[in-house]
Image (cartoon, helix red, strand yellow):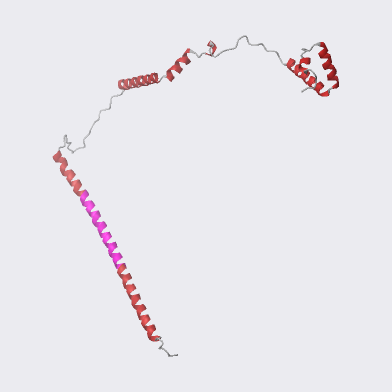
Amino acid sequence: MSCSPFDLKDYFLKELADPQRRQVEAHVKSCGPCREELDRLQLTESALFSVRDEEIPQRIAFVSDPIFEPSPWRRFLTDFWGSTARLGFASAAMLSAALVVFALYRPAPAPVVQIAPAGVRTVATVSETDIRPVVDAAVAKAVAAAEERQAVRTKELVAEVDHARRGLLLAAQELEYAQRRRGAERVMAGLMNPPAVNGDVR
């Protein structure tokens, strides 16, 4: 901010008339702050002139210019991946091709050769009458095993209950014995210390 009657930038850029220029020059000689501002303007001008000149572009590029357009291959891929219908069709085509290749080039399964051990008769068909006795025997065996386990568990439970009953009976006898003993102790204490009769001084 200068105190000159005219703008120092106009003086520096030579936009003032001669009488006004002389007036600013006289003011700058006597005013320190205005002289400093004029020096800063001269430094700015010298810094700007020291910057290398660059050629101004002839035309500004726009996004719609052909140089920014993607290649046809990239456009195809973008359109392909952006379409759900095309992706679905491509997936179905690949799956169909894989199934056809698998069906054509699948190796034949190796023949299964069954060798019967010597002396064992092979049975071609098994009827329900043959299976029924085997199933009945297996069921009977399973039921017998379950009943045996249940009987063992029942015996264990009965033994536990019997043991608990004996413990309770023993505890009841001890409690009854303790009560009798306490009663006997009270009787003995009453005999040893008879109650005082009125007027009886010991």
Q: Nearer the viewer, residue 18 or 89?
A: 18
Instruction: Looking at the picture, tell me which residue is in the foreground, 25 or 113.
Output: 25
Q: Position of residue 39 (x, y in %)?
A: 80, 20
Is residue 52 shown in magenta?
no
Task: Check the image and report above or below for 119 versus 49.
Answer: below
At 33% from the left edge and 77% from the top edge, which residue is drawn? Answer: 180
Judged left or right of residue 67, residue 174 is: left
Placement of the N terminus among the 4 image quadrants: top right
The answer, for residue 135, to whether it is visible in the render is: yes
Instruction: Decide whether residue 166 is among the magenta residues.
Output: yes
Q: Quadrant of the C terminus?
A: bottom left
Q: Is residue 11 left or right of residue 143?
A: right
Q: How many marks are shown on the rendered structure?
A: 0
Q: Position of residue 65 (x, y in %)?
A: 54, 11
Asked whether residue 202 appears in the rendered view, the answer is: no
Location of residue 90 with respect to 138 vertically, above or below: above
Q: Which residues are magenta?
A: 142-167
Q: Position of residue 160 (x, y in %)?
A: 29, 62
Q: Main secondary structure of the magenta part?
A: helix
Residue that appears at 25% across and 60% down: 155
Residue 111 in which image quadrant: top left
